[in-house]
Image (cartoon, rainbow, N blue to C red):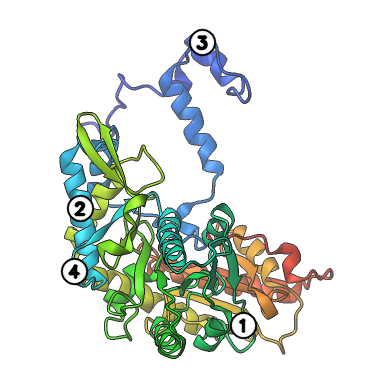
Amino acid sequence: MPLHSSTNASSPSPYLSTDAAMLALMKRPLPHDHFPQHPSEPEMVYQILSEELLLDGNSKQNLATFCQTWESPQVHRLMDLAIDKNLIDKDEYPQTAEIERRCVNLLADLWNAPGEAIGCSTIGSSEASMLGGMAAKWRWRARQQAAGRPTDRPNMVCGSVQICWKKFARYWDIELREIEMTANGLCISPEEVLEQVDENTIFVVPTMGVTYHGLYEDVKAISEALDDLQARTGLDVPLHVDAASGGFLAPFTSPDREPWDFRLKRVKSINASGHKFGMAPLGVGWVLFREPEDLPEELIFHVSYLGGDMPTFQINFSRPAGQVISQYYDFVRFGRDGYAAVHGSSHEIAQYCAAALNEIDEFTIIHNGNPAHGIPAVVWTLGSDAEQGFTLYDLADRLRMRGWQVPAYPFTGELANRAYQRILVKRDFTREMADLLLADIRKAVAHLRNHPVVIREPATARGTYNHL
């Protein structure tokens, strides 16, 4: 009996081929700025591209991204089944449309919608945010017109938000009243909100999981403050909850927390990202409305396409279907108990990391991953009394040498000149990986202590990380 089996002779490595065309392809760069004239051998092109992609960072060590970096084999198979399906073609793919409808129903139940579920999938939570914002602007404009008031100066009020809201405000001509952070307030307060709202405010946007520090804003307190404002002045300002992260965390990991969803009557819409803590593949988000009347009919298009009527409220008209199908698979596969177990584990590992990082003299923990307060993330800064022989940007650079992507960045407002650092703990970040990361952080800090950086730079000079 042979000790070693032979390789499959029918599948040789392309690098062993003596075919003239393949050898020529190996010896020249791939086309960079001119469309190629002739075809190339597919396996060889695949091999070259696959190795070029090794220059990207390892997604498993990307602790900056909120997006999922692991999918089950079943999800990969479902994605293959749907690779040629356009989600928008509901007449051609009615069962896929039915699966999207089921997802909306399940989310309406999860977020406690009071009646008929209305909403849709999107490419991500950014598109979902913009759709929620469009609906709010249209509702506000209708109220203004009915009251005979001008409609040319709409505004929105929010805290330190993800870039998508700044895009929305610019694209849809909205004044963005962003309440920036202070040393005593990382999240917006009801008092600050009341100082900013007026009759031109289309909505207030509290965030369940602020991207900078991971904390949940107090939606209930803001809602109650706006209730009191309406009782005193008649001014009715709705809420849209940006639950890009928290929408798939809070219902499972802190179900007894104060209401933040449609249980509050002032909450008219919610957006969430399925490909973040919803655990779906990249490319799916969700927007839901409290009741059908909260989505203005004039924003819904009824398109006659491929023999059927297709109501649509999405910016894109061609959409991959696999992510939505996979999202439904995740809902059925995990259920409430499964999501609670997976995310609960992430919170536990985050708190384990926070406790270990808190033992490093230079570090001050801002958020330790406690599920009652925010998402499974750890955020820290250098203590004010630390011997600053290095910055968190230096630490981030040092960790990148080991493959870890741990962003350093400034906050906003009064904290814009101070650096902070953050790790996101997601489904595939295990205790073993946590221990490896912590060991590398300790080694990096020890190295930087022994090799202090002479040139100092303000936080804003190097804070180029975007919270996407």
- Look at 74% across and 74% down and name the residue there: 390
Q: Amino acid at mark 3?
A: His
Instruction: Looking at the image, tell me whether mark 4 or mark 1 is earlier in sequence order.
Output: 4
Under circle 1, the secondary element is strand
Q: Given this view, does label 2 or label 4 mark the residue nearer the observer? A: 4
Q: Which residue is mark 2?
A: 101
The circle drawn on residue 363 is 1
Q: Position of residue 398 (x, y in %)?
A: 65, 63
Which of marks 1 and 3 precedes in the sequence? 3
* Amino acid marked by disc 1: Phe
Q: Quadrant of residue 404?
A: bottom right
Circles 1 and 2: CB atoms closer than 8 Å: no
Mark 3: secondary structure: loop
For this view, does 360 lie left or right of residue 51? right
CB within 8 Å, label 3 to label 1? no
Structural crowding at the residue carrying mark 3, measured as other residues with C-alpha within 10 Å and reported as few (<14), some (14–19) or many (≥20): few
Residue ID at (63%, 24%): 33
Dot 4: element: loop
Q: Who is closer to the viewer here, 394 or 141? A: 141
Of labels 3 and 1, the one closer to you: 3
Q: Are marks 4 and 1 in contact (CB under 8 Å)?
A: no
Residue in view at x 66 percent, y 68 percent: 395
**Residue 384, horizontal then vertical, whole percent:** 70, 87
Q: Which residue is mark 4?
A: 115
The answer for how far apart the CA atoms under marks 2 and 3 are is 45 Å
Q: Residues within 10 Å of mark 4 (few under 14, many from 20)?
A: few
Which quadrant of the figure has residue 24? top right
Residue 69 in sight from this viewpoint: yes
Task: Name which of mark 2 and mark 4 comes first in the sequence.
Answer: 2
